[in-house]
Image (tube, helix red, strand yellow):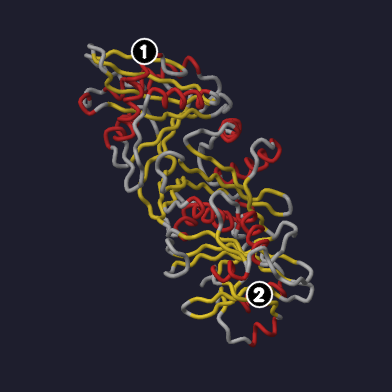
Amino acid sequence: MIDVREIDPADLSLFDEWYDAFRAGAVAGREAPLVVPREALGTSLRNPSPLNARLAVGAFEDGRVVGAMLFEYRLEDNLDTVEVEIDVPPAQRRRGIGTALWQWAMTRAAQLGRTIVQAEVAVPADGSAGAAFAERLGFALEHVEEHLVVPLPYDDSLLPSVPVDGYTLTSWAGPCPPEHRQAYADLHTAMDLDVPTGGMTREVVPWTVEKLQASEARIDRSYLALVTMAHTLDGAPAGYTLMYLPRTDADHVQQDDTLVLRAHRGHNLGTFLKLANLSQLAKHRTTQRFLHTWTALSNAPMRVVNARFGFRAVEEHRELQLRIPRLRPGARGVILDEQDRVLLVRFEFSSGPVWATPGGGLEAGESPIDGLRRELVEEVGLTDFPPPVQVWHQEVVADGHAAGYEGVLNDFYLIRTASFTPGGTLSAAELAAENVHELRWWTLDELDAATDRFAPRQLPALVRRLLTEGPPSVPTAVGL
């Protein structure tokens, strides 16, 4: 049975197990794959940024991690989006593990009120399981870059001869020197505005010196930044290039931004910048064997520059996006007693009565399990039960289910308990205000014979399957 939950990155042995699954899924089938190093990712997760949340989520089976997900979202901008990376080791694929992780992501996105899910997928020439999975989920391809690699140490014979007049260069390793911070922050803003992003939804927030210093301090824990900036002869910034040399990765270096401001293009300045930064790399590199870069297919000038330096494309880097409806998140209990009876609640709506499992909507910041415990205390008086197993996942897009939402998202959990007389902390008047008018135990035969309306509609069949087959290994997706 697959259990999905957030992991504590401070639990180092658990983090290592999670990272092993994350990496195994991320590198499968790829040539010279670049994956964030174990130490760098652990440091990032254990030292949260005030600007964004980054969660490590694991899929567990019999106590072992069999799948991994990074779930990220911004805290001060881009408040409609979340970013998701799901990685399942090849030996564990085609068992629903990715689907279980995706269901967790959808629930958390609904809790956050986010309506855009973004993802990045590396796709070799012969395709990838991740790209196929994203296509089945309905993601749209919004932007494509080439992922290019050149071997290290760099072959000096490949270095182009590019005389450039009218500019001076300044290089540094590590955080930006104080005298260049404002210009460097402004260049970062220009880069964010200039870089091709296709149809990806992205709010550009200007860089300040304070934001630059905070970002560099975080990055410096795991990477040595190698930067070269170009200036005109009167001191005005004209462009920059940036590499990240990991402190704990013995194989890979990342060529990140390269920007030449529009007024200074056409003078081979991009090549000039990269030449200078390669000289920096030669001084600081230890054992790294590959230099990586990424360039949009639409960025013809930079592709020419990369070709001059001998970069070779190894895969596509695809940016994907999925718009999702705004659903009210909820948690519900499939409560079965020792006689295999199920406890149901009768709701009265203008469309007529509906029998459903007890539970309800989650409050802000509340986990599904915590919300379920609160709802069951209030609604039926069940105060103590062991950690439940999730058995169903429901997403319904339809009017009339929750005011202010486009539908509902419910996670259903199996709870085994001795029979009890239901009665929660809410009064009859308070329950009626929430359209609750009756609580009743049902036998399976009564469910099968009933002509009443249930939610989900196939509730009798779902309960029968649960009793005859046991809980599913991955939560069953159910409809209205």
The residue labelled by disc 2 is 439
Q: Describe the element under mark 1 as helix, strand or loop.
A: helix
Q: Quadrant of residue 228?
A: top left
Asked if residue 225 can be seen in this view, the reply is yes
Task: State left or right for residue 416 relative to residue 55.
Answer: right
Task: State left or right for residue 479 relative to residue 303.
Answer: right
Residue 190 position (above or below residue 131): above
Quadrant occupied by the N terminus = bottom right
Q: Marks 1 and 2, Cα distance to the nearest angstrom? A: 71 Å
Q: How many marks?
A: 2
Residue drawn 32% across the image and 48% down it: 199
Q: Give residue 17's position: percent from left, percent from top.
A: 68, 42
Q: Describe the element under mark 2 as helix, strand or loop.
A: strand
Q: Give residue 202's position: percent from left, percent from top.
A: 36, 43
Residue drawn 47% across the image and 65% down it: 402
> From the viewer's perspective, is the residue at label 1 or at label 2 nearer?
2
Residue 225 position (above or below residue 124): above
Q: Which mark is residue 179?
A: 1
Q: Quadrant of residue 346?
A: bottom right
Task: State left or right for residue 191 relative to residue 18.
Answer: left
Indicate the amino acid at tag 1.
Glu
Q: Residues within 10 Å of mark 1 (few under 14, many from 20)?
A: few
Closer to the camera, 223 or 160? Answer: 223
Asked if residue 124 can be seen in this view, the reply is no
Closer to the camera, 314 or 41? Answer: 41
Indicate the amino acid at tag 2.
Leu
Residue 61 position (above or below residue 309): below
**Dot placed on the residue nearer the N-terminal end, 1 or 2:** 1
